Image: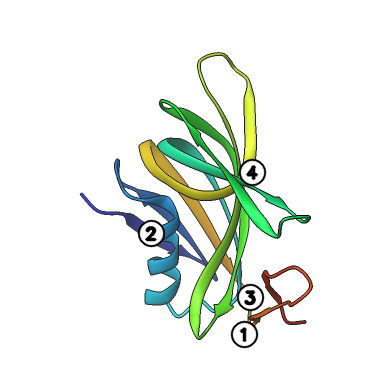
Amino acid sequence: MLMRYAKLGDGFLVRLATGEEIVGAITEFAHAHSIDAASVSAIGSAYDVVLGYFDRATRSYERHAVPGEVEISSLLGNIALKEGRAFPHLHVTVGGRDFRALAGHLFEGKAGATCEVIFRPMPGCVQRVKDEATGLFLLDL
C-alpha cells in the first residue's frame, strides 16, 4: 500500500505506508502536487534513520545512523525549489525504547507503523541558491 492523503482546505494530510522512504515520499508528493513553497510537519515512527549535524568548520555534514525503530516525536521543515525541483529541508527528533531523544537533519528514514505528514503550502515560490560562505543551498529571500 502506498501513501494515502486528503486535501483539507489549502493543506494536505498524508499517511505514509510502512517502508516508504520519508524524505523521498515528501519530495515526490510536493512535486506531484506542484508545491513550490510549504511548511511540513510530521509524527509517527521510523526505522533505518540517518541524522545529520552540519559542521560549519568543515562545511560538511556528520552522519549518524540510528539503530532500530524509533518514534518520531517531531519532524519540522520546509519545501522550496532547488535547481527547479521541490526540495524538503527536514529536521527531526526521534526516540527509542530508552526514551532518549536524538535530533538532527533528516537524511534518510523509512516509515514504521505510520508516518503522518502535514503540508501547509504557501502561495508563491521560493528558490534555494548555493551560498559560497557555507557551501549550503540557502533560501533566496
Q: Are marks 1 and 3 in contact (CB under 8 Å)?
A: no
Q: Where residue 27 sits: x, y (%)?
A: 44, 66
User: Which residue carries the number 1 mark?
Assistant: 125
Q: Is residue 60 shown left or right of residue 68?
A: right
Q: Earlier in the sequence, mark 2 or mark 4?
A: 2
Seen at 45% across and 71% down, the residue is 30
State the separation of the CA atoms marked 1 and 2.
20 Å
State the separation of the CA atoms marked 3 and 2.
19 Å
- State the residue in front, 128 or 112: 128
Judged from the image, the secondary structure of the residue bearing numbered disc 1 is loop
User: Which residue carries the number 4 mark?
Assistant: 104
The disc placed on residue 27 is none
Nearest to viewer (mark 1 / mark 4)? 4
Q: Is residue 47 shown left or right of residue 83?
A: left
Q: Are marks 1 and 2 in contact (CB under 8 Å)?
A: no
The disc placed on residue 122 is 3
- State the residue in front, 9 or 95: 95
Q: Vertical placement of 94 versus 104: above or below?
A: above
Residue density around tag 1, few if under 14, some if 14–19, many if 20 or more, within 10 Å: few
User: Which residue carries the number 2 mark?
Assistant: 25
- State the residue in front, 2 or 68: 68
Amino acid type, callout 3 = Met
Q: Earlier in the sequence, mark 1 or mark 4?
A: 4
Judged from the image, the secondary structure of the residue bearing numbered disc 3 is loop
Q: Where residue 19 sits: x, y (%)?
A: 29, 43
Q: Earlier in the sequence, mark 1 or mark 2?
A: 2
Residue density around tag 2, few if under 14, some if 14–19, many if 20 or more, within 10 Å: some
Q: Where residue 21 sits: x, y (%)?
A: 36, 51
Seen at 65% across and 57% down, the residue is 60
Seen at 37% across and 75% down, the residue is 32
Residue density around tag 4, few if under 14, some if 14–19, many if 20 or more, within 10 Å: some
State the separation of the CA atoms marked 2 and 4.
19 Å
